Amino acid sequence: MSNIDLDNMPSMEELLNGKTAQTKAIQENSIVNGTIAGKNENGILLDVGGKAESFIDRNELKDFDNLKIGDVLEVYVERLEGENSAPQVSVKKAEGQRAWDDIVNNHTEGSLITGKITSRVKGGLIVDVGVEAFLPGSQVDIGAVRDLDVYVGQEMEFKIIKINTERKNVVLSRREILEEQRNTQRAKLLEELQPGQIRKGIVKNITDFGAFVDLNGMDGLLHITDMSWSRVTDPHTVVHKDQELEVMILEVDKERQRVSLGLKQKEGNPWDTADVKYPVNSRVHGKVVNVMPYGAFVELEEGIEGLIHVTEMSWTKKVNRAGDVLNIGDEVDAVVLAVHKDDRKISLGLRQAQSNPWELIKEKYPRGTRIKGKVRNMTGYGAFVQIQDDIDGMIHVSDMSWIRKINHPSEVLQKGMEVEAVILDVDVENQRISLSMKKLTDDPWQNIQEKYKVGDTVQGKVTKLASFGAFVELDGGIDGLIHISELSDERVNRVKDVVNVGQVVTAKVKNISTEERRIGLTMRSGNSSASSEAAAERSTGSATFASAPEVGGLGGLGAAFDAAMGAKQDADTLEVNGTKE
């Protein structure tokens, strides 16, 4: 047994006083060192100089398995005495306090710090930088972030944007670091970019007017008109988000920091050789890509479209709206009518790709051919008769009768009536067919002088009465006029006093004009005294013939005949029974 110096051994009172002094040296909310005095599977006993050892649960210790009795640990004193008269201490709080002190002493707002994102909370993320710091969702990235969970577990560099010492609160930003990096990279890229360069980029955003492409330092705009030589109505049909593209630099605005990009410019302009690839009169095939009221656009190849105007869609129909004939997606054959490559325009004809029915009509119905058809429409100057399908011919009012003056086709025709006519002419260029009804028969006036001679006695039926005379239908349907002065040797005041409609009369041919298609008749006996008296009466009683130099001549009678024939056609001014004069 070793010798013990009992004389120098401290008394129990001194030992207790020393222990108390050491206990008093420990302060709450401070960090002290403690020695491991014991260890079991649940935790350790740590001597920090208190009346009893403090217990620390193994879950609070990072390296529990490697700890041993005698090791020194740094702990945070929460309370000096607990229920067992042992101080309550915490290893984690000691680590947190040291970390906070490190941040306060070694970092300022605006400095950089590395940390690990540990969890997601409302409004952002929690980052372990020694202490728990808050990363707002708006400060995670440059653009909007839809899923914050993908960042949990990642270790990154952050900028401290706020330190609140009172609340021990730290707010971080990753966005500011990225923006600074981008600005630096953008400035460098703006110096490097030149029009005509081919660069790789990633589609970051798509709008109605184009797409924004990340050129690895800044975004450039790929406008919808620069995506393709062909028509693009929706940028999504050409590019998609996160797609990698090779684009051409079109323009660099360093002052405004804007870059214009082109996708179609990487390839040659197809319009440069359009006139060679699509010569006039060549036949082409394409798909209808757009329809407007005035025409349809047909894509011949990517970047090349031609227009079929409504006037070039049908040989026979009048097309008012292109949509009545063609729809988007239709595949059509057409003929090139014109090419204007400088204006990027090609005119196409749909009807020219088909046989011209007007040429076939001209071959099928030469001049003089008799046809039958239904009256489909009438105007003031003629009637349209269906010849074949949608092709009509027109009978002018002047070609409806040899012997009558027709003022309106309704005088002899009705809509839907089937008529017979003769082809006068087929005008292929103007798409017109002229018809004639009167030429179905010979012109009765051609040989009128062989059939009738001045002085011949003729019979006919009175067809109409007028104030100036009576119309008599002769053989062949030709009308002759008996002037009121020629109805009798006696003076006649009213035509109906001598003749009536439907009455058959006998008269003599007084004069004939083949050129003017007129026949004058007389019912006078030819007695000289009666003629003189009648002549005297005519000079005073006949306004129609007052200016005639000679009653038997064509001068005055011709004027009267013209007036009579015109009035004869107007049913509203003629009175068949002779009650109006």
Image: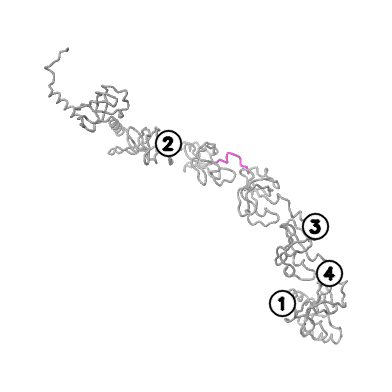
Mark 2 and mark 1 lie on one chain; the one further toward the N terminus is 2
Cα gap from disc 4 to disc 1, whole angstroms: 28 Å
Say whether residue 98 is magenta: no
Who's the residue at 14% across and 15% down the image? 4
Q: Give left or right: position of 113 versus 283.
A: left
- Residue 366: give its label: 3
Local crowd at mark 3 within 10 Å, few (<14), some, or many (≥20)?
some
Residue named by callout 2: 150
Q: Secondary structure at mark 4?
A: loop
Q: Amino acid at mark 1?
A: Thr
Which region shows up in magenta? Answer: 262-270
Asked if one can make out residue 555 in the rendered structure from this viewpoint, the answer is no
Q: Amino acid at mark 3?
A: Pro
Tell us which disc is closer to us: 4 or 2.
2
Residue named by callout 1: 573
Q: Amino acid at mark 4?
A: Pro
Residue named by callout 4: 444
Mark 2 and mark 3 lie on one chain; the one further toward the N terminus is 2
Mark 3 and mark 4 lie on one chain; the one further toward the N terminus is 3
Mark 4 and mark 2 lie on one chain; the one further toward the N terminus is 2
Q: Position of residue 237 (x, y in %)?
A: 55, 43
